[in-house]
Image (cartoon, rainbow, N blue to C red):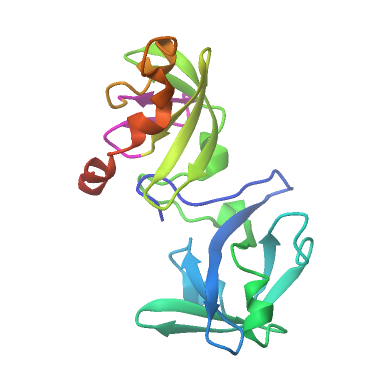
Amino acid sequence: MARRSVSTWWTPISSKTKLRVGRLLKAHGLKGAIKLELYTDSPKERFVPGAVLELQVPETSPWFGKTVTVAELRWYNQSPVIFLEGVADRTAAETLIKAILIVDAEVSALPAEPDAWYDHQLVGLRVLRDGVLVGKVIRVDHLPAQDLLVVDTDAGEIMVPFIKRFVPVVDIEKGEVQVTPPGGLFETLENDDKPGAEQGIPAAIEGLSEVVDEA
């Protein structure tokens, strides 16, 4: 689970939501095992033998539109490794690398946790800075270091690290979030004609690792 959000991919289908529960990283050994990056706090429940997982892969992938079935989840040096039915060797495993694993879950069954929201709850919220409307959340990007709120503004898209220091208030009922972004993040777009502005948003976000670790 991320600092202030959960890694979730959502689509409005009935009373269910689709949750991203993991990502396949790289082949492990010669017998089809694949190292797994967890997007869930309940791996033993999500990856039980027989569990069927949907795949989020490019349309060019041979796995596009298919599902996989869990054969076994093991732990090596405290890192999860998954075996899937029908994936019997390293060559087959490598065709699944970078695939996102997805499960269906009832909305009513989703856990309520403090400082945690699903993506569909955040998308569309108004974004206020010092009480002034600056844009709205259009998506949540999940990166290894932290999640980012992508904010649509009059000047373009801005990525705000989704940590408590920079997003102190999330009010779903009011339909808004309050941001206190690091210096230069919003100003970058406002001054994009000035010398040095080509560094843009990445430069504003770069170097935040120490701040994020402390949040």
Q: Please report the residue visible at 45 percent of the width from the left and 48 percent of the height from the top.
A: 143
Q: Please report the residue visible at 53 percent of the width from the left and 42 percent of the height from the top.
A: 119
Asked whether 90 or 75 is in front, the reply is 90
Q: Please report the residue visible at 35 percent of the width from the left and 23 percent of the height from the top.
A: 185
- Quadrant, the N terminus: bottom left
Q: Is residue 93 above or below residue 42?
A: below
Q: Which residues are magenta?
A: 163-180
Determine if the magenta segment contains residue 43.
no
Asked whether 192 or 119 is in front, the reply is 192
Q: Main secondary structure of the magenta part?
A: loop
Q: Can residue 70 be seen in the rendering of this structure?
A: no
Residue 46 in the figure: left or right of residue 134: right
Residue 76: % across, % down: 40, 84
Count every numbered label the image shows and give the total.
0
Q: Can residue 36 be seen in the rendering of this structure?
A: yes
Asked whether 94 or 180 is in front, the reply is 94
Determine if the magenta segment contains residue 175.
yes
Q: Please report the residue visible at 47 percent of the width from the left and 56 percent of the height from the top.
A: 111
Residue 116: % across, % down: 41, 46
